[in-house]
Amino acid sequence: MTIKDIARLAGCGVSTVSRALNGSSEISEQTRERINEVIRQYNYTPNTNARRMRQSAGKTILLIVNGSSNLFFSPLIEQMQMAAAPSGFQMAVNYIDEQEDEVSFAARLCAEQKPAGVIFLGGDMRNFRKSFSQMTVPCVLSTANAEELGFGNLSSVSVDDFDGGREAARQLFDQGHERVGILGGDLSSYGPSGLRYGGFCSVCSERGIDVPESELCAYTFSSAYEAAVALFHKCKDMTAVFAMSDIIAVGAVRAFLDMGKRVPEDISVLGFDGIELSEYSNPRIATFAQPLHQISSLSVRMLVNMIENDAGASHVTLRAQFRSGGSLGRK
């Protein structure tokens, strides 16, 4: 028995039955009694679970996480969930493969679950350019800058990755390292790795230093380990490595140590992100730490403001801060 059946048997509309079930005063007593008689006759019980799901959907934020093994995202997810709670929102976390189109995935979930908004944690800008026009709910892209895309319902919170790459180059060159290798993701993309690489190369150009050798790898320890070995055989005279993430830096340090190299005496390693593991590795990873608390709190605050106050898109760019560590020494 459904409310459609009740409406047919009671000779009224589905919306009238719905109002009667919700105790509305907008229907006559005669109609209400006719509906209640059908309910009693067929022993109808409303599906409270379904009703609860419909009511809570408007207070749900989808969190789309690009990649399931990125340790940088773990504290951000936890902090975002805590930041959303005081405003009465619950966060539904969804992990996708790094190669998957996160925007199309989010659009499908929005059609099914009707959330209040979406936060994308990481993502490929090419997918946003191609697919974001199908998104109608307020959204925030966290850890990447979406300002140039110009979508009215897409805000962003990011770190200035290009500036981070420039600061990494200055840090290494000022320590006397001119033969530097780079380990990272797609260095040609308009994403964190590509922007950091671009910033690094801009300083090389200013100082008349050759563009560094590089090796592509995923953001995993095993991939970084293999890439570090390959990079060393490609550039045996390098004295330092700039890793596009702390995860890559930790994998690279392990590879160099296993090859009989000392870190930092033979090869220095500089990371990026500032994850907790970098502080407890041996040696401690020198890195550019991203402001995790600011990223998480601002992402949630901006989205809630868009949802509740119909605010337009806004964009915040933060800076990573250098944190010294035993993996970096002078040449």
Image (cartoon, rainbow, N blue to C red):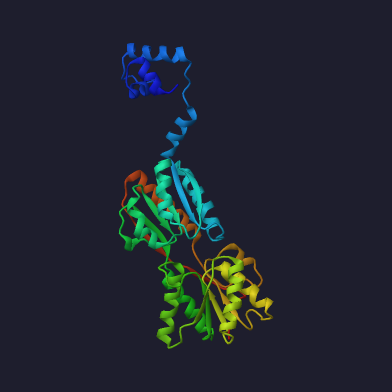
Q: Is residue 142 above or below residue 11?
A: below
Residue at the image point whose x is 32% and y is 53% from the top: 133
Near-viewer residue (179 or 135): 135
Near-viewer residue (228 or 286): 228
Q: Position of residue 39 (x, y in %)?
A: 43, 15
Residue at the image point whose x is 38% and y is 51% from the top: 139
Which quadrant of the figure has residue 233?
A: bottom right
Q: Position of residue 81 (x, y in %)?
A: 50, 48
The N terminus: image quadrant = top left
Q: Position of residue 79 (x, y in %)?
A: 52, 52
User: In the visual, does 320 lie left or right of 24?
Assistant: right
Which quadrant of the figure has residue 159?
A: bottom left
Residue 278 appearing in the image: no
Q: Position of residue 28 (x, y in %)?
A: 31, 14
The C terminus: image quadrant = bottom right
User: In the visual, does 193 lie left or right of 252?
Assistant: left
Query: In the rendered picture of this protein, how many numbered marks are placed on residues?
Result: 0
Q: Is residue 320 above or below residue 24?
A: below
Residue 321 appearing in the image: yes
